[in-house]
Image: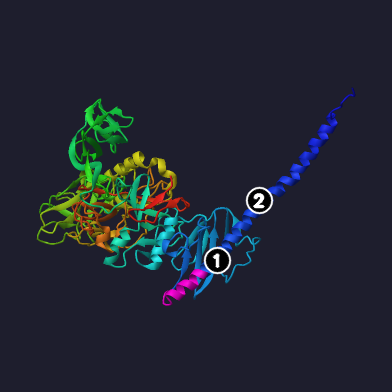
Amino acid sequence: MKNKKGFTLIELLAVIAILALLVVFAVPNIIKMFGDSKKKAFVTEAQSVFKTAETALISKQLSNPTTTIRRFYSENDSDKLDLSKSDNLKYCIKVENGKIKSIAITNGEYWYINDDVSQISEIDTSDDTKFGTGSKTISCNSSGTAELDATENPLYTAMKEMAETGDYAATYSGSSNDTYGETGTETIYYVKPYAASNVEGLLNSINVKFAGFCWQILRTTDTGGVRLIYNGDPDSNGYCKSPSTTDTHLGIIGTAGANDTFPANYMYSDSFTYDSNGFTLVNPKEDNWSTNKNLVGKYTCKAENTSTCTTLYFLHSPHLTNASRAYYNTYTIGNTQNAQIGKSPFNSNSIILAYSGYKYGDTLYATVGTTEPTDGVIMGHDVYWNGTNYVLKDTDGNTSTHTYSSSTGQENNYHYTCNTTSATCTGGKVRYYYYINSTGDKYNYTELKNGDKVEDAVSKMLTNTENNHDSTIKALIENWYRIKLKNYESYLDQDAVYCNDRSVDNLSGWSNSGNIVKASLLFNTRSSQSNFGCSNVKDRFSVRNAQAKLNYPIGLPTVAEFYLNSNNSARTTGETFWLSSPNSFSTYSYINYIDNSGVIKSSSNVSVSFGVRPVITLSPNIGSSITGNGSFTTPYEIGE
C-alpha cells in the first residue's frame, strides 16, 4: 500500500494567505457593488418620482386649469403623489409657473436636492452639494420651497407652513429673548386664526401628544424650538380634545392660607408625590420654623413626625411682625379641569411689590401699612442718610420740609416721613408713601432702612432682585415636572427662557419726582402685550441662567403668547388660568391671566387661586421622530 501524504504546514499557510488576499481585495468590491446597487436604485426611484410628478401636474392642470399647483409633498395627504412602489420616500417638489422647479428627496439612506431643475434624467451623484448619504428631514413649506434639513423640528416646519397659508398662524417680527444667551436667529411663528370661522380648524391643527399628555402649540422660538402649553390627559381612545369645564381629572388644588405657628417636630421637604389618597413628602427632615427661616419654600404636613397627609402646607414667607408665624397656602387633591394640572395662587402674599416675581429676593421691604399720615407730621420730598438716621429734604434739596395736611393735595411731591413732627427719623427707618386709593381712605406705605431710598427699593425688588426664593406657583409647577416629565428631559430645550418681565412702564407713586400717588405702578406687559422680548436678564428664567435659575425647563405662558392670538374663542378653556406677566401694583400685586371667556385680565391679585397650565419648549433638534397631523384624533406624537 502506498503512503498518502497530506499538505505540509507551509502549504496550508500559503493557501490561507492566498485566501486572505482574496478576501481583502474581493470583499470591499462586493460591498461597493452592493452600495452602488442601492445608490442606483435610489437614483431610479428619484427619477420615477420626478416623472410621476410631471404626469400628475399635467393631469391636475387639465382637470382644473384655474388651480395653482405649488408643490407635491409626501407628508401632506392633499399633496401626495400616487407612488405605490415608492411610498417609503420623503419628498418635496416645487412647482413654479406650471413647471417643476426644484426637488428634495430622501429614502433614509440617500438624499438628493436640486433647486433649479427642469428634468433629472441624469443625477450627478458626485456632486456632494446635491447628493449624499444618511437620513435627512424634509422641510417643505406651502409654497413648495424644497429643503433637506437634518435638524429642523418638524413641528417648527408645520408652523411655518401654516403661517405661509395664513389660516392658523402668523409670522412674528418683533424682538425676542427665547434663550438666555440671546443666540436665536430663527423666524418665530405663532398660532393665530385668520378669522373667527377659523378657530375650530386652528384648534384641530395644533395638538401634540408628549410624555403621555396632550399639549397645544403656542408658537415657535427664535432657536427653532416649539413652545407647547399643557392641555390635559388624552381620552380613552388616546385622542386629544378641546378644553371643557365638564372634562376633569385629579389635580392639585391650592388655596391661599393665612398665617400660623409651625412648632418643632414638624417634617419638611423640598418636594412631594401625590395620588388620589393624598400627599407624601420626599426625603422629609424634622425642623423648627421658629429657629430656621430657611424653611421658606418648603412643604409640610403640619403635624409631628408625619410625612403623609391629605392637606399639604407650603411655607411662603415669614410673618411681617411675628417671627414665630409664617404665611402659607394649602394644597389638597381634587377634581380640576383637564386642561390644567391644578389650581394655585401665584404667590400667597400680595401686598408686597416683590411678589410680582416668579422668583424674588430676600429684600422685600415687608413692613407695610395703610394708615394716612397724621395732620401736622413732617413730610419730605427726598431724604439723605447721615450714617445713622434719615433726614428729610424738600424739593430744593434743603432740609426745610412740608407739613402734612390732608387738604393741601401735596401728596405727589412729598412721600417720605418719620411720622413725627421732626425732620430727622430716629431708629434708622423712614416711611415712604407710594399709593393712595381712589376713595382716599387707604394710604399705602413701605418702611425703608439702612440708607435705602425708594429707587433702591424698586431695584432690589424688581430689576436687581436676588431671585433666591420661589413663588408659590413656580414651586408647584416644578414639583409636578419632577414627577411627570423628568424622564423626558432630553426632548426639551435646556436653553429656553420663560419670561417674567418685571420692567416698569410707569413708576407712579414709586417715584418721588411728582408722579401721581393715586395711580398704580404699571409694568411694561400691561401697555406692551405683543412683544416676546425680555429685556432684563434677571427676568429670563432658564435652567442655564444663574441669575434667574429654574430647576427644570418649564414655566408659564406670557401675555404676548396669548395676546397675539387675538381671538378669545381660541384662548378660552372655560376656566381662569395664570400667565407669567406682571400687570400692576397698587395696594396689591396683580398678574395677567386668561379669564373663563378667553379675555386677558388683571383684576385679581396674586393670592387668588387660578388654574395652572405650564408651558415647555421642544428642542430644535428633536429630529423626525414625530408622527400625526396635529388634529384631535391624530395629534402630532413624539416618539419616546
In this view, the residue farthest toward the top is 1
**Residue 467 circle label:** none
How many residues crowd around disc 2 within 10 Å: few (fewer than 14), some, or many (20 or more)? few
Residue 60: in magenta span: yes
Question: How far across and how far down the image is residue 185, in percent?
Answer: 46, 60
**Residue 34 circle label:** 2
Question: Dividing the image into 4 quarters, which one contains the N terminus?
Answer: top right
Give the magenta-colored segment's residue range.
55-67
Question: How far across and how far down the image is residue 594, in percent?
Answer: 24, 56
> What residue is drawn where x is 54% and y is 55%?
107
The CA distance from mark 2 to mark 1 is: 25 Å
Q: Which of 564 and 382 is in front in this view?
A: 564
Q: On the image, numbered disc 1 is attached to which residue? A: 50
In this view, the residue farthest toward the front is 1
Q: What residue type is labelled 1?
A: Phe
Earlier sequence position, callout 2 versus callout 1: 2
